[in-house]
Every structure is written in structure tokens, then in C-alpha cells.
Amino acid sequence: MNSTASLPVTTSLPFRTPSGNRNGGGPSNNNNGKGQSLYIGFVSGCLAAIGATTITNPIELVKTRLQLQGQLQMSNKIYNGIGDAFVKIAKNEGILGLQKGLFAAYLSQGTMQGFRFGAYELFIKLLNNKNPDGNYFFLKNLIAGAGAGAVGAAIGSPFDLVKTRMQASTMYANDPQFRGYNSVYSSFKQIITNEGLKGLTRGMATSAQRTGVGSGIQLATYGSTKKVVLKFVDEGAYAHLLSSLVAGFFLTIGMNPFDVARTRLYYQGKGNSNGEMYKGLMDCIYKTTKQEGFMALYKGFGAHYLRVGPHTVLMMIFWEQIKKMLS
């Protein structure tokens, strides 16, 4: 069994020169292979994210609304749980309402995951961490995952901001902030008009921190779990599934407080009925726990895992298969 297959991204990709030799023989071919590896990481991550997002966007919508309702005890509680949210959204907004913000989610996830997986390849090379039996393998994997996740999240944050506001726009129909959030274009126009270009950076730092933590946990636990799983089952979709489920669970535990804070920071803005409630990540966490209790940081946890679990599974399966096709 190939030990390098235990990693989600660090597996050496077989590139062929015109003569048929693997990985070439000279420095120029090697450099070309490195560039091609980064390209494959970006494209496969982007396409895998779009495929997974199509399926998981409805539960992402539910998670967002569960995290927003009742914040700081200043807004009403609309939904009594995941099932109730699905029923009410479908009843009041139609079945297509469950896919609200889908195109913005494509742009967000495609950009974020593309740069995340591409940057992960780069970080792994810089840290010289291709050998799962090498020194500090887990730590290096964690650092590479966190760094790549932060880069991807920062770049994709404006699209995520738009997606969150589009998904919340019909939750509180009387909120003046969300008038005109009917499309990605109109949403960007609203933000720039009312908040300036700086408004597009709202929540960006928290998004980078959130995804850095999540990516570090996900990619490190996925790679390490897969290494164990491959001792019992052969490389393939089943091994990817088991590894992804474990990675997704730990990811949700570590990331949910950051996710709640990010959603709320994205939601607030000029014109919001409740005004500017939070100054940043720590202020949001402090006020949330003070007014709603510590467990408020785990609002939407069930929906988050139901989204992250399948999304992680689909992302990793799509990513592994697309990467093989491209290489």
C-alpha cells in the first residue's frame, strides 16, 4: 500500500514529459512539474468546492439563520430547529428559497477552496513535508493547512459576505440594510454604495482566522486519519469517506464559535436595524457569551456539522477524483 496516499494534498503527482519519463530529468522539467502541481491543486479545489456547494447550500442557509436569530436577545427567534427552518423557508420562500445565495456561494467556495488547496501544495513544499513518516509530520501538516485556509478565506471573504447577507435578506424582511440584495451584482453595489469599498473587508480577518483554524484541523486530521484507515482498507472512496467524516466532526467542534462570530460580523452594517453591534471577533464572542450564554457560540452546531460533514466528504471525494483526472 502506497504510504504517500495517506495525505489529501501531499501525494506526489505523476507528471510525464513528452518522452514518457515521470517527473522529467532536469531542473526545468521539475520546475514545470511544481507549477503544474499548484495549478492542479487550484483547479481541482475550485471544481470540487462548486460540486459540493450545490448539494450543501440549503443546510448552509439554515445554519446561517439559526446563528443569527436571537443575537444578543435583540432579535426574534423564528426557527425551532433544523427541521422547522427547512419547512418554514420552503413554505414562505418556495423550494428555490433553500438555494438562496447559491451563485455567491459558488464564487466564495470556488475562490476560497481553489486558493486554499493551491496554497496548501505550496506550503507543503516549503515545509518539505511530503513524507508521512518524517519528523513533525502532523505539526507541519497543521501549519500548512492553517496557512492555506487563512489565505483562501481572506481572498474569498467578499463573496462570503454577500452570500451571508443574501441568505439573511428575507429572514428579517423589514430590515432596511437588505433592501436590494436580489443578486450578487446588486448586493455588491449596495455594500459599496452604503459602506464604501472598505465594507467589502467586513469580517475578513475573522473569516481568515475561522478558516485557518478549520483548515488546520480538517487537513491535519484528514491526512492522519486516512493514514490509519489505509491500514485496514484499500485506497478509494470508502477510505476518503471515513477520513472525511472524522475530520468534519473535529472541524465543527473547533470552528463553530468562529463561524457564529463571522456570520454576525457579516450581518451587521450601516443601515442594520440594530446598528453596529460588534467591533471584532473577540468583542462578538464576549458580548454573545455575556448576553446569550457560552452555548450560544455553538448555535447551529447540528446544522453546521450536517453541512460540514457532507461538504467535507464531497469536497475530498470530488477533489481526489478531479486531481487524478487532471494529473
Image: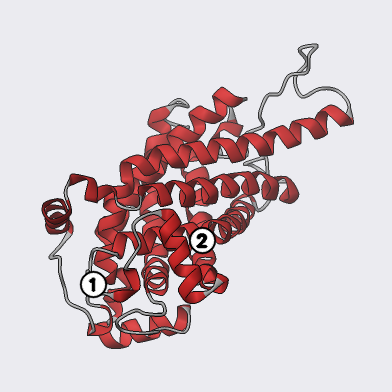
Circle 2 packing at 10 Å, graded few (<14), some (14-19), many (20+), is: many
Viewer-closest of 290 and 217: 290
Task: Say left or right for 101 vs 66.
Answer: right
The quarter of the image holding the N terminus is top right
Please tell me whether mark 1 sits on a helix, a strand or a loop: loop
Task: Say left or right for 296 vs 121.
Answer: left
197 lies above or below 17: below
In the image, farthest residue toward the top: 19
Residue 125 figure quarter: top right
Q: CA distance from mark 2 to mark 1?
A: 22 Å
159 lies above or below 18: below
Residue displayed at 56% across by 73% down: 198
Residue displayed at 28% across by 68% down: 67
> Residue 209: image x %, image y %?
53, 67
Task: Say left or right for 35 vs 78.
Answer: right
Viewer-closest of 64 and 8: 64
Please tell me whether mark 2 sits on a helix, a strand or a loop: helix
Labels 2 and 1: the sequence-earlier one: 1
Viewer-closest of 269 and 227: 269
81 lies above or below 175: above
265 lies above or below 319: below
- Quickly name the residue at label 1: 69
Residue displayed at 30% across by 69% down: 298
Residue displayed at 31% across by 84% down: 274
> Residue 72: image x %, image y %?
27, 83
- Quickly name the residue at label 2: 157
